[in-house]
Image (cartoon, rainbow, N blue to C red):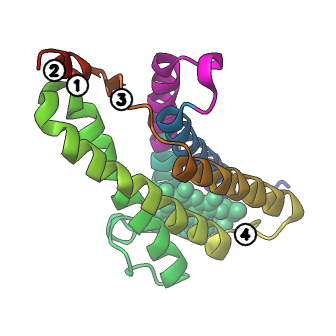
Amino acid sequence: MGNIAWTWLGIRAAGITSWGLLTAVVLWGILLRTRILGHAASPTRLLDLHRWLGAVALGFLALHMVLLLFDAYLPFTISQILIPGLSSWETLPVALGVTAFWLLIPVSIVGRLRPRMKNAGASLFQRTHWLAYAAWPFATMHYILAGTDALESWSLALLIAGGALLVLGLLARGFIPSPGPTRAAGSVVVRSSANSNK
Ligand code: HEM
C-alpha cells in the first residue's frame, strides 16, 4: 500500500464518484420529468437535488482530470486531457471520457444561464439536456475500458445497478407521460397562465 501513489488512488476514486453522481443526476432528471414518486418528492426538491448532484459530479470530474496532470506513473498534458484522441495511453477509452466531459459542458453552461434566458432559452435548455443522456454511455464505456478496477466484482455490481436503474427510469419515462414543467432551472414556467388567458 505504501508504494501506491496517492494521485492514482485519487484519480480512480474521483472517477468512480463522478460516474456514480452522473448516473444519479440522469436518474434524478428522469424522476423530475416523470414525477414517478408523486407526492413523496416535491418537484422543487427534486430539481434542487438534481442541480446539486450535477455540480458535485462536475467537481469530482474536474478533480479526476486535474490529478492526471500530477500523476507520476501516467502523466497527462493539458491537451491530452482536453482533446479526444491525443492520449498515447489507452487512446480510445480515454477519448470516450474526454468526449463525455465535452458533452456535459453545454448542459452545465446552459443550465446556469437558463434563469436569465427566460422562455426563449427553453428549447435550447431541452436540446442541450439530451447531451447529458448521451454523455452517460460515453462515460460508462470509458469507465469499463480504462478503469483498473472496472471488472472487479464490486465495480461490476455498481455498473449493473446504475445501468439497471437508468434503463428502468428510461422505460418509465417512455411509458409515463410528463405532467408538464412547473419550474425549469429556476424560472417559473408560465405555460398554464398563458393558456388561461386565452
Ligand atoms: C464524464 C466523464 C468521466 C467519467 C465519469 C470518468 C470516470 C472514470 C472512471 C469511473 C474510471 C475508472 C477508475 C478505475 O476503476 O480505476 C476512470 C478512469 C480513467 N479516466 Fe476517467 N472519467 C471521465 C472523464 C475523463 C477524462 C476527461 C479524462 C482525461 C484524460 C479521463 C481519464 C481517465 C484515465 C487516464 C483513467 C484510468 C485511471 C486508472 O485506472 O489508472 N477520464 N474514469
The residue labelled by disc 3 is 181
Task: Tell me if 172 is positioned left or right of 114 in this view.
Answer: right
Q: Disc 3, ligand 1: is the CB inside 8 Å? A: no
Residue drawn 14% across the image and 27% down it: 118
Q: Residues within 10 Å of mark 4 (few under 14, many from 20)?
A: few
Q: Please tell me which residue lies in front, 73 or 96.
A: 96
Residue 77 vertical placement versus 25 (above, below): below
Q: Who is closer to the viewer here, 67 or 148? A: 148
Q: Residue at x 45, y 52 (%)?
A: 66
Dot 3, crowdedness within 10 Å: few (<14), some or many (≥20)?
A: some
Q: Residue at x 37, y 55 (%)?
A: 130
Q: Residues within 10 Å of mark 2 (few under 14, many from 20)?
A: few
Say few, some or many: other residues with alpha carbon within 10 Å of mark 1 (under 14 / 14 to 19 / 20 or more): few
**Residue that carries the numbered disc 2 in the rendered image:** 194
Q: Are marks 1 and 3 in contact (CB under 8 Å)?
A: yes
As for residue 189 lying within the magenta part, the answer is no
Image x and y of residue 97, in percent:
48, 66
Secondary structure at badge 1 equals: helix
Q: Quadrant of the C terminus?
A: top left
Q: Are marks 4 and 1 in contact (CB under 8 Å)?
A: no
Q: Earlier in the sequence, mark 3 or mark 4?
A: 4
Instruction: Please name whichever residue, 70 or 152, is drawn nearer the observer in this view of the structure.
Output: 152
Left or right: residue 135 versus residue 121 is right
Dots 1 and 2: beta carbons under 8 Å?
Answer: yes
The residue indicated by pointer 4 is 148
Q: Which residues are magenta?
A: 36-58
Dot placed on the residue nearer the N-terminal end, 3 or 2: 3
Label 3: element kind:
loop
Quick one: SS at disc 2? helix
Front tag of 4 and 1: 1
Q: Position of residue 99 (x, y in %)?
A: 39, 68
Say whether mark 4 is within 8 Å of ligand 1. Answer: yes
